[in-house]
Image: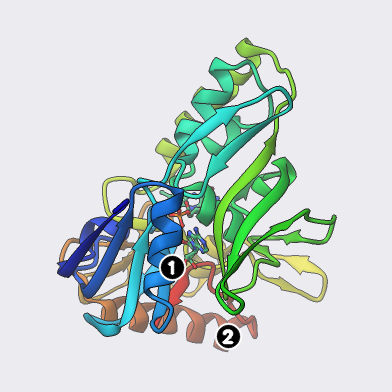
Amino acid sequence: MAYLTLKDTSLKKYNSLALEVIATRLYLPLDTQGLLDVLELTKDKRRVLIGKGCNILLSKENYDDSTAFIVTIMDDELILNDTELIADAGVNLSRLAWFSLEQSLKGYAFLEDIPGTVGGALIMNAGQYEFSFGQLVNWIELYDTVSNQVKKIIPDKDYFGYRTSKISSTDVVIRCGLKAEKGNDEETLTAILKYKKDRYLKQPRQYPNAGSVFKRPYKDGQSYYVWKLFDEVGLRGYSIGGAEVSDKHPGFIVNLGHALPQDMIDLVKECQDRVKKHFDIDLELEWKVID
Ligand SMILES: Cc1cc2nc3c(=O)[nH]c(=O)nc-3n(C[C@H](O)[C@H](O)[C@H](O)COP(=O)(O)OP(=O)(O)OC[C@H]3O[C@@H](n4cnc5c(N)ncnc54)[C@H](O)[C@@H]3O)c2cc1C
């Protein structure tokens, strides 16, 4: 059996906000066949896929037997063939960036410091500045949980958008094929180290967090920085229970150590309400809320 089953287990180490939440059923596939086996086994359940849990908000303290959590981090084969990289859903983005450098490939440096997996990065179209994961993708293999069949997608130019993709919520990422263009090792390494330095100096890495909470909003054709809006309405450092709008970077909400899911939900709502009231701007969550 190429998967592990855990019962009544804490999800604390499977969500980067480190919320103490209990799952009645958690599956850890060890490889792609294990993932397919788990999907078959959980046909009658609501399935929640987790990569590294770096972009999710677990909104309940307990999830009963009707929800099956499936964590993909151990399904992580990564190979380079003559023409492309083939990466399983659970491949770590940092590993992908370093592997690309080892193989003298270009285009992956921006991923080294984005925590997460290939599966999560495809769903979110993870990225920074002008770079995003979708730009690297040749094809995606998905398990369609409606037809219970595997299908292969070749994304068109509109398939990926700003922190979004057209992958349906009923599809599960199995693996993908990625571009393999030759690059310059020195330039790649310099870029990786620069991203690391800039981000570590700017972001509140001393506390559990899940990256930017909200997407950058647009109003009347103008884009706004969330942290600037928050500063203007006194949200920097504002806290509810154990959840705090980071003092260091207000675009992040951090867990001070004892946050409950409800603290996070209340703080998100307070941020949205204040920004709506003062600027008439609707803030859209970047986090995926698991209800
Ligand atoms: C410190 C920090 C910095 C960050 N910086 C950035 C940044 O610069 N840019 C950025 O874009 N993001 C950033 N993020 C957010 C996060 O790293 C990305 O969104 C990343 O892609 C999440 O990957 P994951 O594997 O953790 O996804 P998860 O959080 O596990 O999942 C995200 C979504 O994808 C779904 N999913 C996961 N795997 C699969 C699968 N195999 N099949 C189907 N659905 C799946 C989940 O159900 C969920 O809906 C940051 C997060 C942190 C903690």
Report crowding for label 2: few under 14, some 14 to 19, many 20 or more residues within 10 A (C-alpha).
few
Q: Is residue 239 left or right of residue 154?
A: left
In the image, is residue 200 above or below residue 207? above
Colour theme: rainbow
The residue lying at 40 percent from left, 46 percent from top is: 31
Q: Position of residue 109 (x, y in %)?
A: 59, 30
Q: CA distance from mark 2 to mark 1?
A: 41 Å
Along the viewing direction, whichever of 71 and 248 lies nearer the viewer: 71
Q: Which three-letter amino acid code belongs to the residue tagged 2?
A: Lys
> Which residue is at a point 46% across and 60% down the rendered structure image?
36
Q: Residue at x 65, y 46 (%)?
A: 133
Mark 1 lies on residue: 39
- CA neighbours of label 1 inside 10 A, class few (<14), some (14 to 19), many (20+): many
29 or 62, nearer to the observer: 29
According to the image, label 2 marks what residue?
Answer: 276
Above or below, 149 against 120 in this view is below
> Could you tell me residue 43's position as x and y percent?
43, 78
Specify the quadrant that holds the C terminus: bottom left
Inspect the image, locate mark 1, and give the three-letter code of the amino acid beneath it. Answer: Leu
Mark 2 or 1, nearer chain start: 1
Image quadrant in which the N terminus is located: bottom left
Check disc 2 and report its element: helix, strand or loop. helix
Tag 2 and tag 1, C-beta contact below 8 Å = no
Front one among 130 and 91: 91
The picture places residue 18, in percent across and down from the top left corner, at 25, 60
Instruction: Work out whether 92 lies above or below 249.
Output: above
Q: Of tags 2 and 1, which is closer to the observer?
A: 1
Q: Seen in the image, is 81 located left or right of residue 247?
A: right
